[in-house]
Amino acid sequence: MTQPIAGIQKRFSELYGRAPAGIVRAPGRVNLIGEHTDYNDGFVLPIAIDKCTLAAFAPTDGRTVNLASVQQEGAPASFDLDADIEKGSPKWANYPKGVAAGLVEKGIELTAMDILFDSDVPIGGGLSSSASLEVSAALAMLAAAGREIDDYELALICQKAEHEFAGTPCGIMDQAISVMGQSGRALLLDCRNGEYRQIPFDNPDLLLLVADTKVKHDLTDGGYAARRDQCYSAAAKLGVKMLRDADADMVSAAADKLSDKELTRARHVVSEIDRTLRAVEAMEAGDYAEFGQLMYASHTSLRDDYEVSCEELDEIVELAAGLEGVYGARMTGGGFGGCAIILARAAQADNIAAEITKNYTARFGHPCVIFPTRAAAGAGSAQDNRI
Ligand code: ADP
Ligand code: MG
């Protein structure tokens, strides 16, 4: 585990005046391939990373749940278990409040409690600090209530919290991998029905580098929601429920029925779903050269057809492609900034990271931050030895 628990234990005691009764953890993620496919009922292939949100908690008397975060200023937010749980201010507390509302809706009787969150997942950096916050909140609340629920159901509750309380219409990937991730495994998840396979991703000769651009470009047109809508209208015109049910031939045959944007968005989604399944075959066969080519193709499609890349992400992928020891690279996550990933030979990874950082800094005047990661365990107690 990257985050030692001594820090949060101490801070919890300072804030709430007693020791926590328990500490849970939920990781962030990177997606190896299968981008912008989850809300089209497609396939994704994420790994949990060894950066996580910790939630320290202790039940209290009374009917109040207190929420505080090391990453947020100000007094703890709170809500009352005898009233309807509603979103409000501060904004960050809407994530755990939404989770609480979802658990109550499932008939789980929550306990009055104090919670403190502490995360080493960069916030707003595309590694899904939001899902790790939600999942850690859910585990803390369930542990205090002495209840357990099914993994995928838990992910769905957290996704609903993000939709309804935080206002982000995300797919299921981030929450699912945070809950279901396994050490040394990538998760092939069918976002239509929650079926999954754990795919071995633990070859010691490989290293996955995450390159954080440290930029987040704001989009004036609600970029994510707009693309979602374009996918849904393309599916409707193709006469299918979701783009998952279409293929490349159907999309090109319907080109005159679709608007330009519907055509390019659909082309990305159907090709990306196909690439994801081919990438799993390549991974299982140990064919990392093929896996890497699929990563590059994914990036090109996200850049040109889905239009969610940016010059910083393109630069990292282009720099990586020119270096020895790199199998493939692509942007990961929603896009418009955030992170790229580079699949590299472990022995050359240091040199690759140094070269990319040097050239990136020369071009943009600020460095990108590159760190190696591996497929880490999903959410659980922070006090056992799961990792
Ligand atoms: P990402 O999930 O890519 O990191 P999001 O914009 O989806 O970015 O989520 C970031 C938001 O999640 C923050 O603005 C904040 O409201 C909330 N958040 C995430 N981690 C924490 C944390 N440790 N403490 C408080 N709020 C957090
Ligand atoms: Mg998020």
Image (cartoon, helix red, strand yellow):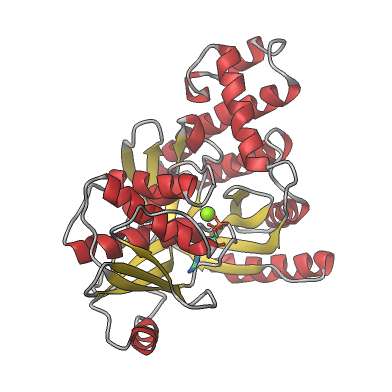
Residue 338 in sight here: yes
Image quadrant in which the C terminus is located: bottom left
Residue 378 in sight here: no
Residue that protrudes farthest toward the front in the picture: 83
Q: Quadrant of residue 227?
A: top right
Q: Quadrant of residue 230?
A: top right
> In the displayed structure, does residue 386 sit left or right of residue 171?
left
The image position of residue 290, as x and y in percent, is 54, 41
Image quadrant in which the N terminus is located: bottom left
The tally of labels here is 0
Relative to 340, say whether 249 is above or below. above
The image position of residue 274, as x and y in percent, is 51, 29
Which of the pair 360/231 is nearer the observer? 231
The image position of residue 300, as x and y in percent, is 69, 39
Which of the pair 323/20 is nearer the observer? 20
What residue is at 61 percent from the left and 68 percent from the top? 370
What residue is at 36 percent from the left and 83 percent from the top? 12
Which of the pair 359/53 is nearer the observer? 53
What residue is at 48 percent from the left and 64 percent from the top? 373
The image position of residue 21, as x and y in percent, is 23, 77
What residue is at 41 percent from the left and 53 percent from the top? 98
